[in-house]
Every structure is written in C-alpha cells, then in structure tokens.
Image (cartoon, grey):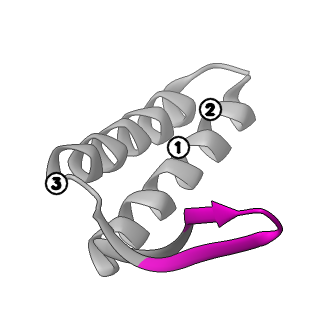
C-alpha cells in the first residue's frame, strides 16, 4: 500500500509539473460542412485548450500529499 501511494503521488506531481510547463495545447478538429451526394466538404479547424490553474495546483498538492502519506505509512 505504501508503494502504491508513493507511485500515484509521483505520477500526479509529474502531471502537475507538465501542466505548469505547458499550460496550453492545440489540437485539430475536422468538421463536415457540406455533403452533396458522394461529395463531402470538410474543414480542418485548429483549436486551443488551456489547463486551469486550479487543476494544476490540485495535482501538485494531491501528489505531494500522497507522497507524504505513503512515506509515513507503516509497511
């Protein structure tokens, strides 16, 4: 149990650090705008999403808490 808590905590801390270093990301989404018979027209749209600061802080705090609880837990 101790090891599982520490591993989960480290994973959460790494995700939090990744969110701090790269808070926004872009992705492409294709949408079909017209379909006439066998002809299809699609548009490739670039969208940007941002990781909320509260989520980043929650990841870091939860990861630190799990690491500390795992370190204090008895085997």
Mark 3 crowd level (few <14, some 14–19, many ≥20, 10 Å Cα): few
Q: Nearer the viewer, residue 27 or 69?
A: 27
Earlier residue among tags 1 and 3 = 1
Q: Which residue is mark 1?
A: 9
- Name the image quarter holding residue 6: top right
Tell me: 38 left or right of 45: right
Whole-angstrom CA distance, mark 1 to mark 3, is: 19 Å
The percent position of residue 29, horizontal first and vertical second, equals: 53, 69
Mark 1 crowd level (few <14, some 14–19, many ≥20, 10 Å Cα): many
**Residue ID at (58%, 53%):** 11
Is residue 40 within the magenta segment? Answer: yes
Q: Which residue is mark 2?
A: 5
The percent position of residue 75, horizontal first and vertical second, equals: 74, 21
- Name the image quarter holding residue 46: bottom left
Q: Secondary structure at mark 2?
A: helix
Mark 2 crowd level (few <14, some 14–19, many ≥20, 10 Å Cα): some
Whole-angstrom CA distance, mark 2 to mark 1, is: 6 Å
Viewer-nearest of discs 1 and 3:
3
Q: Which residue is mark 3?
A: 53
Region of the chain picked out in magenta, as a range: 31-45
Q: Secondary structure at mark 1?
A: helix
């Amino acid at each position: 149990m101790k090891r599982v808590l520490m591993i989960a905590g480290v994973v959460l801390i790494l995700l939090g650090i990744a969110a701090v270093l790269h808070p926004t990301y872009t992705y492409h989404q294709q949408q079909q705008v017209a379909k006439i018979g066998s002809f299809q027209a699609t548009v490739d749209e670039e969208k940007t999403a941002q990781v909320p600061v509260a989520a980043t802080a929650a990841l870091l705090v939860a990861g630190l808490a799990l690491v500390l609880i795992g370190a204090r837990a008895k085997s």
